[in-house]
């Protein structure tokens, strides 16, 4: 409930489709908030990492700490005030959140911390539905998130470039080099062009076109890394404009959901709004302050993603459907800017393997490149010295990060048998927060 759009989204779905009454869909969340649940070792660890932030706000400390200290594993986390807010939302719909007592508490909490919210900002907030990004890759149809998530376009661009090459196992150094170079160029275009398309013109059709993918792929040298500082590429002509969770679901009728929700960093802003139990996010970090100022995930952006009233910031969330002759794969993950590379690697692994092994798909070692900083980030203990030497021989700089990342959730439903299977990332119990 830390994401401003989530309550409105629930109400919108219930109103449009008439199949998810809020009092039913929110009942489990109300129960968990009221009765509590035991925190696992990961919760204990991340609360300890952010203990000082949580202690700065009395309402936050009361909601997430044990007598103002990070709790031990097994601590029962009860949030009765959040339960009351959820019950109000279930009863009154969006008005139970965006107007009245809850809205007043949200505005007061933000402005007390130095913000500039108005009651009208919440009252006038609306869900915007956009057509998803849809494209093909080697015979598969892929559907992914639209702007202001940059994930769908970055995924489409990366795969569009890679379609020009003969690929093997994405874990092999020769394929990894090509994947890294495709990610480098996709993230460059993210910085150059992407923003909220309600505010700035974004050349989506061009970025998704096969011709543009061919142009960008032509700049990739299979034998050597490109220096990000020297990479220009074909500029698209267009007018200039000014902690995450994922779940995958499919039912017996084939209806599917890939949902990625974010509050940005662990515990978001660290502010619980008064007696609402609502934790506020810190998604403003996803906007571009200046082209030379990176955000918390070291991403740099352009003025298309500059802050403006009513504007939605870019994100990297990449909930995705992959459909081929075998069936439909639903996947996504948390992980900030590394979400895109996680999903990309999983798709390549899925399409490269004659046998469907979901557990291998979610457990495979991960590497990442995002144009800037100009380095390949790899998980610890995931790659051999020989693999690293082969990548470095092509001119890539490698950084081994402190912890594994992501918590991918995958569901696959067979077209032939109708049987569904699922896999959960083994990293989920203890992964890095950045």
Image (tube, rainbow, N blue to C red):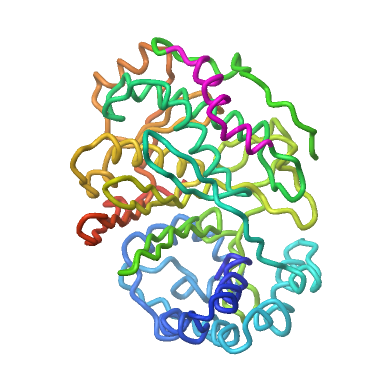
Q: Is residue 206 left or right of residue 19?
A: right
Figure check: 344 above or below 245: above
What x and y, as percent, mark residue 243? 50, 55
Q: Residue at x 33, y 45 (%)?
A: 324
Observer-nearest of 243 and 235: 235
Q: Is residue 429 left or right of residue 114?
A: left
Find the magenta span and give its range: 203-221
Does the magenta run of residues contain 220?
yes
Q: Residue at x 57, y 36 (%)?
A: 298
Figure check: 111 above or below 219: below
Observer-nearest of 164 and 306: 164
Q: Residue furthest bottom?
A: 91
Does the magenta run of residues contain 291?
no
Residue 6 makes an appearance in the image: yes
What x and y, as percent, mark residue 338? 46, 41
Q: Residue at x 37, y 54 (%)?
A: 330
Figure check: 266 above or below 305: below
Q: Residue at x 67, y 31 (%)?
A: 192
């Amino acid at each position: 409930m830390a994401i401003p759009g989530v309550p409105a989204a629930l109400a919108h779905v219930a109103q449009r489709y008439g199949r998810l009454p809020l009092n039913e869909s929110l009942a489990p969340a109300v129960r968990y908030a009221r009765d509590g649940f035991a925190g696992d070792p990961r919760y204990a660890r991340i609360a300890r990492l952010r203990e000082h932030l949580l202690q700065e706000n009395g309402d936050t400390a009361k909601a997430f700490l044990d007598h103002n200290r990070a709790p031990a594993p097994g601590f029962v986390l009860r949030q009765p005030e959040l339960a009351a807010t959820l019950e109000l939302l279930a009863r009154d719909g969006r008005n139970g959140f965006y107007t009245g007592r809850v809205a007043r508490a949200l505005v007061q909490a933000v402005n007390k911390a130095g913000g500039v919210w108005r009651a009208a900002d919440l009252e006038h907030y609306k869900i915007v539905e956009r057509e998803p990004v849809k494209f093909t890759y080697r015979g598969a149809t892929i559907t992914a998130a639209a702007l202001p998530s940059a994930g769908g376009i970055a995924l489409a661009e990366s795969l569009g470039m890679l379609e020009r090459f003969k690929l093997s196992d994405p874990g092999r150094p020769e394929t990894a080099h090509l994947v890294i170079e495709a990610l480098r160029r996709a993230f460059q275009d993210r910085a150059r062009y992407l923003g909220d398309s309600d505010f700035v013109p974004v050349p989506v059709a061009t970025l998704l076109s096969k011709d543009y993918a061919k142009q960008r792929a032509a700049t990739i040298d299979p034998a050597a890394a490109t220096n990000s500082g020297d990479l220009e590429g074909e500029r698209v002509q267009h007018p200039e404009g000014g902690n995450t969770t994922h779940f995958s679901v499919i039912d017996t009728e084939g209806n599917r959901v890939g949902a990625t929700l974010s509050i940005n960093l662990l515990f978001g802003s660290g502010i619980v709004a008064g007696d609402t139990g609502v934790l506020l996010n810190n998604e403003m970090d996803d906007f571009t302050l200046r082209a030379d100022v990176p955000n918390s995930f070291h991403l740099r952006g352009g003025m298309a993603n500059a802050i403006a009233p009513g504007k939605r910031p870019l994100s990297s969330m990449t909930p995705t459907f992959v459909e081929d002759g075998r069936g439909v794969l639903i996947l996504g993950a948390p992980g900030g800017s590394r979400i895109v590379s996680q999903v990309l690697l999983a798709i390549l692994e899925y399409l490269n393997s004659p046998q469907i092994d979901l557990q291998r798909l979610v457990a495979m070692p991960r590497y990442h490149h995002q144009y800037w900083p100009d380095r390949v980030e790899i998980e610890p203990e995931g790659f051999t010295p020989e693999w690293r030497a082969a990548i470095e021989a092509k001119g890539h700089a490698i950084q081994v990060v402190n912890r594994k990342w992501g918590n991918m959730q995958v569901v696959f439903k067979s077209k032939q048998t109708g049987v569904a299977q699922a896999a959960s990332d083994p990293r989920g119990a203890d992964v890095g927060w950045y």
